[in-house]
Amino acid sequence: MSTAYAESIAIEKRFAALPLAIHNAGDTVLSAGSKTGRLLILAKGTVTVVREGIEIARVTEPGAVFGEISALLNQPHSADVSAVDTCAFHVAKAAALRDPDTLYHVASILARRLDGANHTVAELRNQIRDGHPHNVISRTVDKIEVLLSASGASLVYAGYPYDPYA
């Protein structure tokens, strides 16, 4: 068994042992400006992420993490997260970030998000330099927003092999 696979199993077991919070369609899961001291790991459902009145993401992937930036930086949440349908979340207190496996998982999520955004910023600079049309540049800016939001593919826990609620 590879080390990465063993680590993914360990994280999966930790997530499964966490308490579940159920939110119904239309519920606000996290509010911009609030501090909850929680990390939420999507187990089932669909959520929207709205920042400054603009929907920047729709997330459906089990294992997606919410609240990590607030917990790491001890600052209020920067976006509203709302349930589109009935959602289940594994809930961890921010103190879970003291656990090396959990911290590594969140750090790898953030690193992949940042790496993708950096590549896309370089693409944007080239588009501006080369005089690409506004609509092309606008799509690239949208792509950066998605990469830096909770919907980036990097938020999906790559080792999460199944949906326990299916």
Image: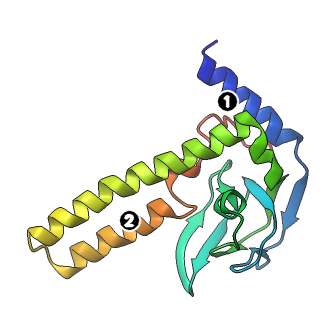
Q: Position of residue 114 (x, y in %)?
A: 44, 53
Q: Residue at x 72, y 40 (%)?
A: 102
Q: Which one is nearer the viewer's eye here, 58 or 138?
A: 138
Residue ID for mark 1: 8
Residue 121 as seen in the image, left or right of residue 105: left
Sequence-first tag of 2 and 1: 1
Task: From this view, report whether residue 98 is shown above or below residue 51.
Answer: above
What is the C-alpha distance between the residues marked 2 and 1? 28 Å
Q: Residue at x 76, y 57 (%)?
A: 40
Q: Position of residue 132 (x, y in %)?
A: 13, 73
Label 2 SS: helix
Q: Quadrant of the N terminus?
A: top right
Residue ID for mark 2: 143
Q: Position of residue 5 (x, y in %)?
A: 63, 23
Residue 78 as seen in the image, left or right of residue 85: left
Task: From this view, report whether residue 21 is shown above or below residue 90.
Answer: below
